[in-house]
Every structure is written in structure tokens, then in C-alpha cells.
Image: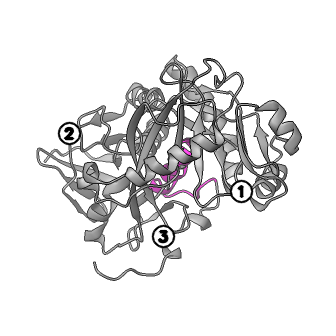
Amino acid sequence: MSDEIYDVVVVGAGVEGSAAAYYLAKRGKKTLLLEQFPLPHSRGSSHGQSRITRKAYSQDFYTEMMHEATDIWRQLEREAGWEVFRQTGFIAIGQYKGDFLEDNISSLKRNNAQFEYLTPVDFRRRYPMLRYPNDFSCVADPDGGILRADKALMAYQTMFKTFGGRLIDGAMVTNIKRGNIVTLETPNATYRGRSVIICPGPWASQILRPFGVKLPLKTVRISVCYWRDRHPGAHDPSVLQPLSARGFTWGVYGVPCFEYPGHVKICLHSGPDIDTELRDQADDKWVIDLMKGYVREHFPSLEPSPSIVETCIYTNTPDEHPVLDYIPGNRNIVVGVGFSGHGFKLSPVVGKVLGQLACGETPSYSLTPFRIDRFPPQAGL
């Protein structure tokens, strides 16, 4: 074991852990970032070419966070020197005057964010490639767009190292010993830090169990489907924005032709429950069948069967809000987990508040919605 002591050790180099490490190193904190897999990898929730970003949220606290998050994304891409955020706009689709769109509008108004509320007639006129019920419309969020996920993650990690941070991959943390100085054991080395941030993604149960923490997390596998455009150019970002649609049993999200030429990404915001280590054995036939019907009905210009199917993992909480808090009884061990499929866009601010907690500071935002004790104790540790 080295005598070296870090100010903060971050466990997990997905987007949330990398954002926290970037924030701390930029502040001059001596920071170590540990990742269990060799980088890059596709076993968690941060890989891939695109994620949606938006200020349109039903909850005020997310819209508030996204103001600063958007600014930090722009700052990060200036530092890295490559594109991270493509501002194409975003549309939230749902029943006109229904709760989903009205809640988005209320949040946008209260946070002084720009938006446009289309009537059903204007919605159909502007997006003739879509086919939704006649009483459906959308809220257009001009500040939304596409995050280039792999490039964003690379930017965090590159700038983290530029600011003096140390990144070690292929280093699975097997044991964390509490104390004023926290000791972290891996198969090949032992590390020490004054504070620790744990961003474990779908491996949360394993790493939190020794602390007596059992959260009601559900891990699901998402089928990331790409559908061929039968009318090239009809679904390009210049004519169709990234979208989220509600008003049905399942939520759906989409990204226009961006990653694979001539293909639109449209996915179900859900999937089969999985054991993280057995993710490749999950049966997603029901997801593909469901989405075939959805695309056939609402995206008639696309081929009704996906040409490409990839996978991603969500780690969901019951209320779909993450946990951002100290481990109970440990003021120098912080956890960030349960981002429920919408955490990537928020990572600049999530990284900041996790870093502030690790430094013993008052976070810049109220973390009441994200407290660990909002869930009753779980049996079966």
C-alpha cells in the first residue's frame, strides 16, 4: 500500500463519476478515478454516440440544474477542443393541454427558459413525418439537442488528467474500509483518500451492501433501436429534433439521423429487468415487438423493423430521481446512483454537487429530492 493519500477517490468512471472527478481536479483537489473495466467499455450506462439534452422537464429542480449544466457542457467542449453538444432543439410530445406538456411548460416558465407550445395543427404542419392522434402536440425546447456521449465522456476524462487527476482502469474495488482516511482495495493495489465518491451504476448493490445500505434499485436493459429512413433527409436534425413522447403506457425517446447514416434512433424508455452480470441473457423480444408497432403507427416513413439494435443499462429508482447523498453514518463517503435513464445530461451539475459533498461543502442546489433516506429501509441485506 502506498503512503500517498488523495483528497478524493472516485469509484466508477462512467459519466457521473468522470464529471465529479473533472470538477474536483479542476478545483485543484488531488483526485484518483478508479474504473473496474479497461476503458473504453460498453458494459454500463455511459457508452454510445448520442444522448438527449433538454431543459424541458416536468420538475422544476431539473430545469434549474439544466441551465448550469448546459453552460458547463459548452465550457467542457471549449476545453477539450471537440464538439460535445449539438444544439438542435428538443420536442416533448403529448396530449395538447394534458398534464405532461402542461407540467413541462410550468417548469420552463418558472425557470425563465425559452419554449414554444405548438397547437395540434401547427404540430402536424411542422412535423409531417410524424403521425400522432389529432389532439397531440409538442413543447419545443430550443436549448435542447444532442450530446455526443462517447466524446463527452472522453472530454471529461481527458480534461481530468490535464488538470492533474490520475485515472486507473481495470481496477475493480473489492473492499472499502471506513475511517478518517478511507482505504480502497483492488486486486492489484490499495489506495487511500480523505473522501470517497461512489458512482457504481448497475453494480450498486454489490458495492453498497457492506455499508448496510440496500436501495430499491431496479436494473433494466434498454434496446437501443435504429430504424432506416425510407425518405433520406426526412428525419435529419435540421427538420426533426430529439424527442420524448408520453401519453401511452410506455415512454419513448428518439434522436434524428445522427449516428448511423439514414437511421433514426427510437427506443422504449424501459426494458426487461436483469441481473447485471447476466445482461446478455435478457429476453427483449417483447420490447422489439412493441417498438415495431409503435414505429409503424407513429413514424410511417421509417422501415418498421430495426436495422441495428444495441444495448444500454438503466439503474432505476422507484421515483426515477437519483440518490445524491452521504452513506449513512459516513460524512466522507458519498454515493451517486439510480439515474433512471436521464442522468447523462445532468452530469455536469451532478459531478459538481457530488464533489461539493465530498469536500464537506454545502451543495449549490437543494438535494432534498435526492436524499438517500427518502426510501424506507430495505430488508434482505
Span of residues in magenta? 343-364
* Residue type at tag 2: Gly
* Residue type at tag 3: Ile
The residue at 69%/29% (across/down) is: 240
Give residue 58's mark: 1
- Give residue 156's position: percent from left, percent from top: 45, 32
In three-dimensional space, the C-alpha distance between marks 2 and 1, rounded to whole angstroms, equals 39 Å
- Give residue 152's position: percent from left, percent from top: 48, 30
Residue 350 inside the magenta-drawn segment = yes
Query: In which quarter of the view is residue 162 placed?
Result: top left
Residue occupied by mark 3 = 372
Give residue 70's mark: none
Q: Is residue 332 visible?
A: no
Residue occupied by mark 2 = 170
- Give residue 83's position: percent from left, percent from top: 55, 20
Quadrant occupied by the C terminus: bottom left
Which secondary structure lies at badge 1?
A: loop
Task: State which tag comes first along the sequence, 3 or 1.
Answer: 1
In three-dimensional space, the C-alpha distance between marks 3 and 1, rounded to whole angstroms, equals 22 Å
Task: State which tag comes first along the sequence, 2 or 1.
Answer: 1
In three-dimensional space, the C-alpha distance between marks 2 and 3, rounded to whole angstroms, equals 29 Å
Q: Are marks 3 and 1 in contact (CB under 8 Å)?
A: no
